Amino acid sequence: MTRVAFRIPAALQPLAEGRRRLDVELPRSPLSLGEALDALWVVCPAMRDRVLTEQGDVRPHVNVFVGTDSSRWGGGLAMEVPDGAEISILPAVSGG
């Protein structure tokens, strides 16, 4: 079994029953970021459309990190997720 923790930003917490952190167990290791996110969608299905596009890619204004490594530079959804990893979902913040 592989266990990963998701850090949920305030903007998405209403879609996760107000939780800031979700621990998810998966049947095997190693796994990809895409597989880990698929497990998150089972628990929080409404969050998927806020994080991924209709084509299944991470939205341009959303950053996903495995530990301190950005998925944008680490292989995207194919990025390997080790057992015990912490995955952070961070929507971009802008303003003036």
Image (cartoon, grey):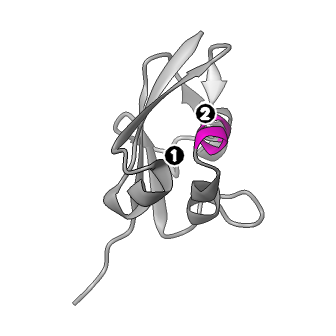
Q: Nearer the viewer, residue 57 or 22?
A: 22
Please name the residue that numbered disc 2 is placed on: 36
Residue 71 tag number: 1
Q: Nearer the viewer, residue 17 or 1?
A: 17
- Which of pointers 1 and 2 indicates the residue nearer the eye? 2
CB within 8 Å, label 1 to label 2: no
71 part of magenta stretch:
no
Query: Which quadrant, please, contains the C terminus?
Result: bottom left
Q: Quadrant of residue 87?
A: top left
Label 1: element kind: loop
Label 2: element kind: helix
Residue 12's spot in the image, x, y percent? 43, 59
Q: Please report the bounds of the magenta region as a residue range.
A: 38-43
Tell me what residue is drawn at x 32 percent, y 59 percent.
Answer: 10
| Residue closest to the far bottom | 96
Amino acid carrying mark 1 in the image: Ser
Tell me what residue is drawn at x 68 percent, y 34 percent.
Answer: 35
**Is residue 72 shown above or below 32?**
below
Residue 39's spot in the image, x, y percent? 64, 34
Nearer-N-terminus badge (1/2): 2
Amino acid carrying mark 2 in the image: Ala
Residue 27's spot in the image, x, y percent? 67, 14
Query: Which quadrant, please, contains the N terminus?
Result: top right
Q: In the figure, is residue 70 to the left or right of 58?
A: left
